Image: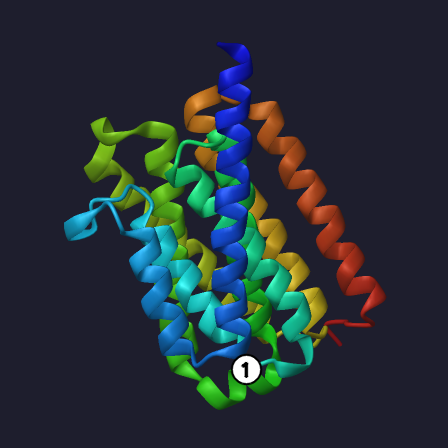
Amino acid sequence: MAVKLRLILKEGHWSLATKSLVLALFWFWLPFWIFAFFSFLLFFWNYFELASFYWRSFFALLIVSGMALYFPDYRILFLALVFSLFFVLLGLESFLFVNKKEIYRIFNFLLISASLLFFFWAEFFASTGVYLFIILALVNYWLFRDLFFLYEGEKNNKEGRVYAISLTLIMLESIWAIKFLPIGFINQSAISILILIGIQELVLSLEKKREINFFLLLLTVFSAVFLFVLFFSGWSVN
């Protein structure tokens, strides 16, 4: 029985890896609408009326994949990212991973981090403006919603929406303020990602009941890194 189970899991890995690679190559070579169409068919093949648990994460991934096309110089890097994220998402959908909460948290972190990098990229922001901010809000809401839903389940569905909206507003207000700091998009992204880690820990604390000392430690680390970034970027209040 154990040998048969290992064979099934091994076949599942290769099958999902092949599907993810095909989707990534579609993204790389074909028009975006073709990639979007086939990824939609593949993801929702057995799920009509968007009944899949991870449908919000799927559309967030689709949006970020479209944003990545605006950076042709980094297409090889984004090809690897699209492949990896689709593999993880399809694996979660197929119950391939045992530690699905930890795996999804990594997926959630990478996807939001990528959207933050795009937001702080000056040329991209200048060409998209307020539309990019709306897209970022939607992506953050979907991903925070799924993160909360994964940890809390359907029993707190309404509460999950409130949490997702609140966390999205906190994230957006933070990155909008950071956008005006003259510290470069890499440092801006780094500070925003630190905030993201703090928000994820807040969601995680709902399940693990973190003590106040943990959040004080998190706040201390964030403050130290924030001051470190400001100092080495040469920024001052004068």
Question: Which quadrant of the view contains residue 134?
Answer: bottom left
Looking at the rendered image, the quarter that the C terminus falls into is bottom right
Residue bearing the label numbered 1: 70
Q: Quadrant of residue 231?
A: bottom right
Residue 99 visible somewhere in the drawing:
no
Q: Nearer the viewer, residue 196 or 10?
A: 10
Residue drawn at x 35%, y 65% as measured from the top left: 38
Front position in the image: 3 or 234: 3
Q: Residue 54 in the image: state x and y as whole percent.
A: 33, 45
Give, as a three-letter code, the residue at label 1: Tyr
Q: Nearer the viewer, residue 130 or 57?
A: 57
Q: Position of residue 188 (x, y in %)?
A: 65, 67
Q: Farthest residue toward the bottom?
A: 127
Where residue 42 sits: x, y (%)?
Answer: 34, 55
Position of 120 with respect to 171 (left or right) is right
Whether 141 is drawn above or below 103: the answer is below
In the rendered view, how is the structure colored? rainbow
- Image coordinates of residue 56 in percent, x first then y, are 32, 52
**In this view of the protein, can residue 37 be seen by the observer?**
yes
Picture layout, residue 76 above or below residue 103: below
User: For the residue carrying disc 1, how many other residues have a C-alpha within 10 Å: few (<14), some (14-19), or many (20+)?
Assistant: few
Residue at the spot 57% in from the left edge and 52% down from the top edge: 84
Residue name at image x 52 percent, y 51 percent: 18
Residue 101 versus residue 192 in the image, above or below? above
Of helix, strand and loop, which one carries label 1? loop
Where on the picture, by quarter, is residue 185? bottom right
- Farthest residue, direction left: 49
Q: Is residue 96 left or right of residue 81?
A: left
Examine the rendered structure and indicate whether residue 129 appears above or below residue 62: below
Q: Is residue 138 left or right of residue 25?
A: left
Residue occupying the point 68% across, 81% down: 73
Q: Residue furthest top?
A: 1
